Amino acid sequence: MLEIKLYEIAHSRAGDKGNRSNLSLIPYDPAHYDLIGEQVTEARVLALFEHRGATSCKRYDLPLLHAFNFIVDDALEGGVNGSLNLDGHGKTASSRLLSLTVTVP
Amino acid sequence: MFLVGNGAGFSGDRVDAPIPVVRSLIRRGLPAALFFETLGERTVALAQLERRRDPELGYEPMLERLLEPILADCFHHGIPILGNFGAANPPAAARCIAALARRLGLPELRIATVTGDDVAGSIDLATLAIHEADSNLRADDAKLVAANAYIGAEPLVEALRGGAHVVVAGRTSDPALAIAPLIAHYGWAFDDWEKLAVGAAAGHLLECGSQVCGGVFWDPGRKDIPDPANIGFPIAEVGPDGSLTITKPEDTGGLVDLRTVKEQLLYELHDPAAYITPDVVLDITGCTLEQTGQDRVALLGLAGKPAPEMLKVTACFEGSWLGEGEVSVAGPNALARARATADVLLRRMEMRGLRVRSRVDLIGVASVHDSDDGALWRAYVGPEPEEIRIRLAVEGEHRDDCDQAAREVLALLCCGPAGTGGARWRVTPRILTRSYLVPRAMVPTTVTIRTAREMN
């Protein structure tokens, strides 16, 4: 077994709606879909944004597209209207998600 | 087959992007339309502030620059142009386009102005239930800047059926800009949910311009794209049966593949079973993709549900002030100097009693992923960056406090640690938003069509 960053096997794009972040997570190889589904849980993704005050995370699974959609509430310290962060939209959050590690065979 | 091209994905997009799209639409010789999406959630409020300053402003500032190279070609080839580039002042945008058309020798260009989305004077917001709101928006004393309903395709279809060459709208739903020309061309019914779902998907995939063709996708060595300085903007091919293929002009950079389409399909989507637009609720849970050729991806299995009863209204209010200041340090011991400077700045806010909420970033160590209290840069252990930019950001009710806070960064040019340089500072007003759901009957729209000659 090998521990690698999600970045090695998946890509992502982040969007926002108010103080809510939306992050897609898409394996390059559909064969990695199940592995990501097992390991990249809502709790682990929430933990990535807890230092910024995120309160909950919901994952939508899209098995036909081989993709996941994560919704993280209160992840943007107020969002584009209220945040003091340079990236009020949280567009760079996709790169943080891809820093998560997963174990692959 | 009908082609829908996109010429802009936001206010601030590449202004030369529409040129190859229009060239491609003409070369293919199929019936087509071109749309511009230039109106973000807050853009309309910023535009409204411009309009207050000058009654002939308040529309997309790049409008003339975007349209000038393509307007004559679109007119001569029967490619209607739709845009929400009217922003807070569609009539003024229409006058700008009319003047451009006359200058280009196109006095017979018919311009439709769609109004009614601006509900600031017609709906008493206080009587409505709040749908979503910024948490730091005070309920009672906030000063309203703008209130606009997200209108659907119907008035845009009316404009196209009335023979408009250019349709100028303010706040519309983004997908409506793609749905409308499809309805106008194919005669789809306004309750043909399966077809409208295809239109909504086309609009959703195209509304951010290059993002479905390699924009915010490319990653050197990992996700390479050809010629990122010249990414092609997207074109949707929609068949009468509701088939949908995403492609791009052949003489441009970027690419369209399963990866780019998946990223954009999920972009700013919440529940994949219910992407709500004023015209249809799109369900992509049954969607599959197929690469049918180079830079060609087909979407299958899109489903639609009935349009919502209510329309969303977003109201923008005057917010607080944002003050920002930055300086750089570099070379040996840069990290220690940057950390100490951060603490000095926060101490200065206290010493001067400035009524602001503050944050410091150490750009190069941690910033965009960090929290307001700097959890990541404070905990950082690792190699010392060669350069660090120190950024102070503050927010407060009083402009002068925010200005004084930002100027504390400027003062570091003399009072900061060794080798401090490159100061920049500024103060900008902020906008807060709140959204409501309103019955459609409360948002009547009007379509006015006149030629450029008549508007002289």
Image (cartoon, coloured by chain):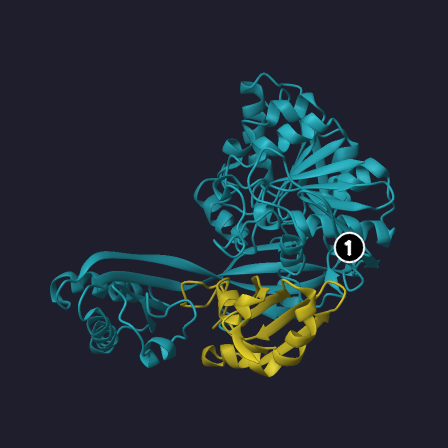
Chain colours: A yellow, B cyan
- Taking depth in this image into account, of B36 and B220 the one nearest to the observer is B220
Q: Is residue B129 visible?
A: no
Residue B311 makes an appearance in the image: yes
Residue A36 image offset from top left, x and y in percent: 64, 74
Above or below, B281 relative to B243: below
The three-letter code of the residue at mark 1 reads Ala
Compared with B223, B158 (above or below) is: above
Query: In the rendered image, which quarter contains the C terminus of chain A?
Result: bottom right
Determine the chain carrying the residue at label 1: B
Quarter holding residue B384:
bottom left
| Left or right of B385, for residue B414 | left
Q: Is residue B345 left or right of residue B357?
A: left
**Residue B215 percent location from the top left of the image:** 54, 49
Residue plotted at (38% across, 63% down): B321
Name the residue located 58 percent from the left edge and 23 percent from the top edge: B101
From the viewer's perspective, is residue A8 above or below residue B95?
Answer: below
Q: Quadrant of the N terminus of chain A?
A: bottom right
Residue A88 place in picture, x, y as percent:
46, 64
- Give above or below for B241 relative to B409: above
The location of residue B379, given as percent across then percent down, is: 34, 81
According to the picture, the residue beneath numbered tag 1 turns out to be B441
Foreground pick, B44 / B263: B263
Q: Nearer the viewer, residue B178 or B22?
A: B22
Q: Tag 1: Cα neighbours inside 10 Å, few (<14), some, or many (≥20)? A: few
Left or right? Give the position of B263 relative to A4: right
Total tally of numbered discs in the picture:
1
Secondary structure, mark 1, is helix
